[in-house]
Amino acid sequence: MTRELLLLRHAKSDWSIDMDDFSRPLNKRGRRAAKRIGRWLHEQHLIPDTILSSPATRALTTAQRVCKQLAIDESAIICHPRIYQADARTLLAILKSRHHQERRVLLVGHNPGLEDLLLKLTGHSVPLSANGKYLPTAALAQLVFKGDWAELSEDTATLVTLTRPDNLLEQ
C-alpha cells in the first residue's frame, strides 16, 4: 500500500514579543501562510487521516489554521510532546509507530528536525528555497512511500511536491 507523509514546518512566529520559545505565537504573515497552505491542501484533496503536531504554540496554531481550511475539527490534532525540538531519528520513531490503517499523515513541527527527516527519507533529493532552506516556515513537503509505517526508513520515500506559501496566490 502507498502511504503519504505531509511534513509541514510551522508558520512564521512573532519574535517581537519577549517570551519563551515554546510559547511564541505566529505573526500576521505566519497566520496568513498557514491559512494559505491549508487552503492548498483542501484544493488538492490532501486530507490527512491523522494530524500530529508539536505542542509549541506556533506549531499547534499552524495545525489549527490548516484544520480550519480543511473543515476538520481541531480536536483531531494529536499533540505529541516529543515533536517539539525533535531530531530526525525521534520524528521517524514517532511515524514508525503510526497505525497501519492510516494512509496519509500530516506532521507539523520544527527545523532542523523536519528538514533532516525530509533529507533522510528522500535520499537528499530536495531543492533548496531561495533563502537556502529546504523547509522555510510554512513549507509543506508531500512524500509517498510503499509499505507500512513501521517500514519507513532512510531513502524509502519520494518527494511529490514541495509547496511554499509564497508561491501560492493570496485569496
Image (tube, grey):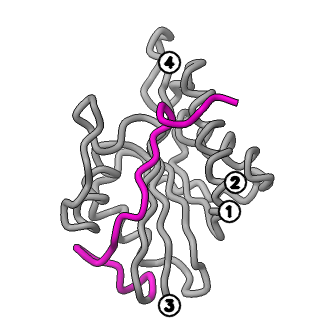
Q: Please tell me how crowded label 1 is: few (under 14), some (14-19), or many (20+) other residues with Cα within 10 Å.
A: few
> Nearest the camera: 25 or 147?
147
Residue 149, quarter of picture: bottom left
Q: Nearer the viewer, mark 2 or mark 4?
A: 2
Name the residue located 54 percent from the left edge and 52 percent from the top edge: 53
The three-letter code of the residue at mark 2 reads: His
Residue type for callout 3:
Met
Identify the mark nearer the N-term, 3 or 1: 3
Residue drawn at (37%, 62%), measured in percent from left and top? 91
**Residue drawn at (48%, 35%), measured in percent from left and top?**
167
What SS does tag 4 mark? Answer: loop
Of the numbered discs 4 and 1, the one sitting upstream in the chain is 4
Report, in whole angstroms, how far the alpha carbon at label 3 lies from the one at label 1: 19 Å
Where are the magenta residues, as a range?
148-171
Q: Earlier in the sequence, mark 2 or mark 4?
A: 4
Measured from the top left, where is residue 62 in percent x and y?
A: 59, 39
Amino acid at the residue labelled 4: Asp
| Residue bearing mark 3 | 1
Nearer to us: label 4 or label 1: 1
Q: In this image, 87 relative to 54: left or right?
A: left
Q: Quadrant of residue 151?
A: bottom left
Label 1 with label 2: CB-CB less than 8 Å: yes
Disc 4 versus disc 3: nearer the observer: 3
> Mark 3 or mark 2, which is nearer the start of the sequence?
3
The residue at the point 50 percent across, 72 percent down is 4
Q: Amino acid at mark 1?
A: His
Element type where label 1 sits in the image: loop
> Dot 3, crowdedness within 10 Å: few (<14), some or many (≥20)?
few
What's the distance in space between the residues labelled 4 and 1, CA to CA? 30 Å
Disc marking residue 45: 1
